[in-house]
Image: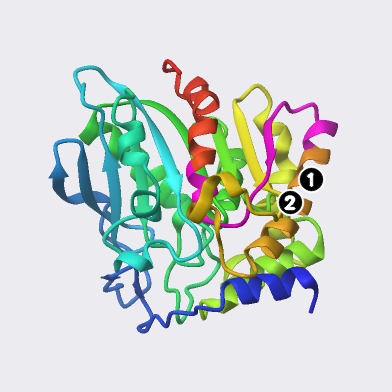
Amino acid sequence: MSIWQRAVVLACAGVVAVTGSLTVGGSVAAAPSDGSSREVSRVLSVSPTTPTRSTVTVYSAAMERPVRVSVLLPRDREKPRPTLYLLDGIDGGIYTNYTQSGWTFQTDIVKFMADKPVNVVMPIGGMAAYYTDWQKPDPVLGRNKWETFLTKELPPLIDKRFNGNGRNVIGGLSMGALGAMSIAVRHPDLYRGVAAFSGCLDQGAPEYRQATAASVSTRGGNPDNMWGPVGHSTWDDHNPAAHVDALKGKPVYVAVGNGLPDPSLGIAGLASPVGGVLEGVVLQCTQSFKRRADAAGVKVTYDFRSGLHSWGYWNEDLHRAWPTIARGLGVPR
């Protein structure tokens, strides 16, 4: 086992059992007996917690179950506005029993975005799913069709319910960074920009694929059910670095730490003992992505900073990425 694989396994060692073949993120789907879905995607409920924050439950026809989504709204909602989609890390909301995204639980995003003319949408759930469409349902992680959800089902529902103008940017951290970047290169007409924090954005090398597969295994999933065996061509199809030319002309922000803590963040800058090792290898993967982006002539705003694989740094990343994100959304910085 490589140092990268060991780091992933150790960092993800807090495995949480999820039982039931289609029980994911606190929702249970009753799939039709013939394996098809006869229902349409729709908003099931909107539960406001404050005037600018709601939990929305959406029925996903692709995943055949309800999915919770956190939505932040600006104070001024008279005009149509763009939408920022932010994806979570590997546990996808488990620390709040799937009541909110890690973004709202671990960062100051609610306060930071309150004065910005933007909808912010954060899916809850998707543990170890990499926000992609899996080839097969998984006995533990269930039926995952997140790419379909985030590109075909959710955006029109959000725009209709929350006065969206059809302009979108997608971002994420760790697992969500790879998911966001993969979706961005595969759907360049839908997402006008992308931000990725501490994600392995080049899945070309065997050791990076094996590490991604290992992270799925730590949550009880079978990685072969995602994109097939690590040597399968489907991995190439979802590798952002292999399709980086799709990002030409778009605002793109990529941040990654060097594996060393930043003392200026204090307690917020700490992580698990392997947080430095994990971030150090993600740095290698990011450098590989940069080489391929540079060769393709794709301009990216990089932040090669100090830091570990932890929320304190991703909170800072969001603040620093905002000017790039704002360009993609077409709003003031």
Is there a contact, CB below 8 Å, between mark 2 and mark 1? yes
| Residue 152 place in picture, x, y as percent | 41, 44
Note whether residue 222 is visible. Answer: no
**Quadrant of res 303:** top right
Q: Which residue is mark 1?
A: 287
Amino acid type shown at disc 2 = Leu
Q: Give left or right: position of 171 versus 302.
A: left
User: Which picture quadrant has residue 64?
Assistant: bottom left
Name the residue rendered at 29%, 48% in the picture. 70
Q: Element under label 1?
A: helix
245 up-or-down from 90: above or below: above
- Between 243 and 61, the one lying in front of the other is 243
What residue appears at the point 42 percent right and 15 percent down from the top-left corner? Answer: 332
Q: Residue 101: horizontal and vertical position, in percent?
A: 35, 55
Q: Quadrant of the N terminus?
A: bottom right
Q: Residues within 10 Å of mark 1 (few under 14, many from 20)?
A: some
Q: Quadrant of residue 29?
A: bottom left
Q: In the image, residue 207 lies at what x, y percent?
A: 79, 66
Q: Secondary structure at mark 2?
A: helix
- In the rendered view, would you say 93 is above or below 273? above
Task: Find the magenta span and give its range.
Answer: 293-315
Residue 314 in the magenta stretch? The answer is yes
Residue 219 is left or right of residue 28, and the answer is right
Q: Which residue is mark 2?
A: 283
